Amino acid sequence: MAVQKVIEGIYYVGSRHWDRPIFDELLELPKGTSYNAYIVFGSQKTALIDTVDPCKTHELLRNLDVLNVKEIDYVIANHAEQDHSGSIPAVLEKYPSAKVVTNEKCKALLIDLLEIKEDKFITVNDNDTLSLGDKTLQFMFTPWVHWPETMSTYLVEEKMLFTCDFFGSHIATSRIFGPKDEKLIYEGAKRYYAEIMMPFRKNIQKNVQKVEELNPSMILPGHGVIYKNPQFIIDAHKKWISDDVDNEALIIYISMHGSTKELVDYLSDILIEQGVHARPYNIAEASLGEIAMDLVDAATVVFASPFILAGVHPKIIATAYLANALRPKTKFAGIIGSFGWGGKGVEHIKSNLANLNVELFEPVYIKGKPKPKDFEQIAALAKKIADKHREIGILK
Ligand SMILES: Cc1cc2nc3c(=O)[nH]c(=O)nc-3n(C[C@H](O)[C@H](O)[C@H](O)COP(=O)(O)O)c2cc1C
C-alpha cells in the first residue's frame, strides 16, 4: 500500500503483492507483481482508474482514506479480470454514488463475475470522452489485448495513457517509475508479455501502432511500473511482437534413466559448435516462466522425452500444450527421445503443437541407450537446425 503522487492531481492508490509466487496458478513471479489503481481529481469530478485484486481491497480503501477521498464519481474499468476489477464492489459500497464506466463487453463480464448491478454502469464506445471538469478521459478500445473487452483510458490534457494489462510488468517495487536498472524493468515486462500477452501477438501489433501514433507522455499500466519514457516499452514490445526470431534453440526435455539426456547433451554441444545458442531445460525442475520468456524470441524448440506408458512423459505433454497455447513465433521444431518397445509418443507431441506455425524436423527416436549411429542422427538434426537458422539469416 502507500499512496504516491504521479503528478499533481493524480495519485497511485494501488497495491504491491511482493510475495505472490505464481500467476493464474500457472507461471512463476520471482519479483512479485502489483495491481495498479490511480485516482484522478478533476475540477468537478473524481475518477478511480481500475481497482486491485480482492485480496488487497483493504489496501486500496486505506489509500483512498489517506487521500481523504469523500466521493468518487466514476470507477473506470479497463478490464474485467478480478486482479483489476475485484475491488469494485467494495468501492461501490464505500462510495454509493459512484458509477462504473466501461464498455458493453466489460459490463457484461463484470455482471457475471462480480454481480455488479446493471444500474451501476455507464457504458462507453471507442473514442468516447468523459469530462472531469478541467480533465478529460478518452476511452481507447484494445480488444484481445488479453480479453475481448480490454481497453485503455487516455487523460487527454496530460497525454497520459492508462493501459491496464497492456504494457504491464510483473514486478513489485516501491519505485512507481521503476528501479534505476532498466534491465530489471525490461525483464519484468518481458516475463509479463511472455506469460500473459504472447498469445495475442497479432492484436498487440495493431494496438502498439495505435499507441505509438498517440505518442503519450506517460504509460501507466495495471501491473508493474509507470513508464515516463513510453518509447522504452513500446520498442521492447515492437521486438517481441515482430516476426523476427533469435538464433536460439530451446530444448525442453525430461529423462528417467539418462538416455534422452545423453541425446539432449549431445544435441546442445553440436548446436553450440554450429553457432546456434542452445538452451536445454530439464522440465522436471525448470521454471515454466523462464521457458515462456525464451519462447518469446527463440527460432527453434525441441521437445525431448522417453516413451512412458505408451506415450511421452506427461510433463513434456503439459509443456508442449502450454507452448502451443502461448503461440510463440518459433519457426522450427524437433522431437527426439528414447524408447524401449514402442508407443505413440511422437503423435502425442505433434497433436499438441497445432497452433505453432513451425516447420517440424523428422523426429529422432532411438531404442534404449544411444549408440554411435544414434548420435549421428542427432548431429544431423543439429546441422539441419543450423542450416535453417542460416537460411533465414539469423546465423552467419
Ligand atoms: C514407467 C516406464 C514406462 C515405460 N513405458 C514405455 C512405453 O510405453 N513404450 C516404450 O517404448 N518404452 C517405455 N519405457 C521404456 C523407456 O522408454 C526406455 O527405457 C527409455 O530408454 C528411457 O529413456 P530415459 O533414459 O531418457 O528415461 C518405459 C519406462 C518406464 C520406466
Image (spheres, grey):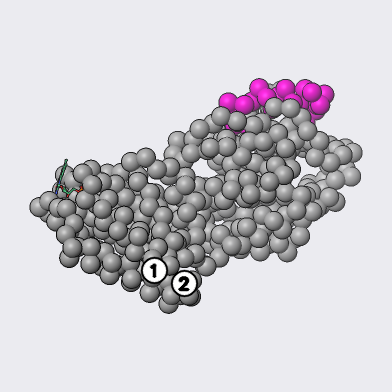
Residue on which the image places disc 2 = 395
Q: Depth-wise, is mark 1 or mark 2 nearer the camera?
A: 1
Residue at the image position 35 percent from the left and 46 percent from the top: 282
The first of marks 1 and 2 along the sequence is: 1
Type of amino acid under label 1: Gln
Q: Is residue 137 visible?
A: yes
Residue on which the image places disc 1 = 274
Magenta residues span: 52-72
**Nearer-the-camera pick, 321 or 362:** 362
Assign the magenta stretch its main secondary structure.
helix
For the residues bearing labels 1 and 2, Cβ distance under 8 angstroms = yes
**Nearer-the-camera pick, 147 or 180:** 180
**Magenta span includes 104:** no
Q: Residue 301 is drawn in which quadrant?
A: bottom left
Residue at the image position 33 percent from the left and 66 percent from the top: 382
Find residue 19 and report its horizontal and vertical position in percent: 56, 29
Circle 2 packing at 10 Å, graded few (<14), some (14-19), many (20+), is some
Q: Residue 265 is drawn in which quadrant?
A: bottom left
Find residue 311 and report its horizontal and vertical position in percent: 19, 49
Residue at the image position 33 percent from the left and 71 percent from the top: 383
Would you say 224 lies left or right of 273 here?
right
